[in-house]
Image (cartoon, rainbow, N blue to C red):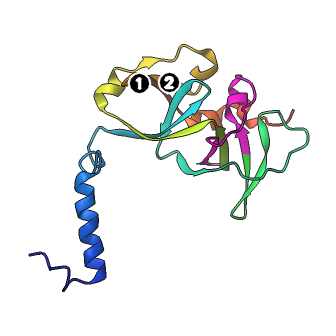
Amino acid sequence: MARTESTATPFEILAEYEQRSLVHAAGAPEQIDAPGLWRGIGFRIGDRYFVSSIAEVNEILSLPSLTIVPGARSWLLGIANVRGNLIPVIDLRDFIGNGRSTTSETTRVLMVRQPAGSIGLLIDEVLGQRSFSKEQIDAAVGEADERYSRFVGENVRLGEVLWGLFSVAALARSAEFQQAAA
């Protein structure tokens, strides 16, 4: 039996509020633990929409101050000090071959941890969490654009948008990405 608010502790009251709000949250909690549901962080580069596994993206930041690295390729924007850790920040649009990114109020950096350390990927906009069912993944189509095909294996339709499943791990393993010196 639930306690009345007048006899409940502050913690119990907050826990009850949380339970009530979760009942009304879109896709929660039944979708959060649903088997076969693939979740990722959606983002935009130019006019293309991508999603990377939620396990690959550790943090989302505004563009931090950067220290330029002499002799680096144009896509290595510089090194950022993020809470005492030096993180290389890569212009993902420039690396892919679509020209330099222009920064705006929507520009963000996806922080991703790789075996060699964390890296930051500059993207045009973060579009939040996206979830795909097994059926949507099974109906995915291959990537036609050669610039992205090394990192995007499939494209999944969600409404009117085609989302490229972007593998940060494949990006970090690529020989070109590992050679940042000009």
Q: Residue at x 71, y 22 (%)?
A: 97
Residue 19 location (% of width, % of height): 24, 63
Residue 38 location (% of width, % of height): 37, 38
Q: Nearer the viewer, mark 1 or mark 2?
A: 1
Q: Secondary structure at mark 1?
A: strand
Amino acid identity at mark 2: Gly
User: Which residue is label 1 attached to?
Assistant: 156
Amino acid identity at mark 1: Val
The image quadrant of residue 82 is bottom right
- Viewport quadrant of the N terminus: bottom left
Q: Residue at x 84, y 50 (%)?
A: 67
Query: Neighbour class for label 2 at 10 Å: few (<14), some, many (≥20)?
Result: some
- Viewport quadrant of the C terminus: top right
Q: Which residues are magenta?
A: 89-115
Residue 103 vertical placement versus 116 (above, below):
above
Which mark, by number, is residue 83? Answer: none
* Relative side of 123 to 55, left or right: right
* Relative side of 146 to 131, left or right: right
User: Which residue is label 2 attached to?
Assistant: 153
Query: Neighbour class for label 1 at 10 Å: few (<14), some, many (≥20)?
Result: many
The image quadrant of residue 108 is top right
Tell whether position 90 is magenta. yes
Residue 140 location (% of width, % of height): 39, 21
Does the CB distance between marks 1 and 2 fall below 8 Å? no
Q: Secondary structure at mark 2?
A: strand
Residue 41 location (% of width, % of height): 48, 41
Q: Nearer the viewer, residue 181 or 24?
A: 24
Whole-angstrom CA distance, mark 1 to mark 2, is: 10 Å
Q: Residue at x 72, y 32 (%)?
A: 101
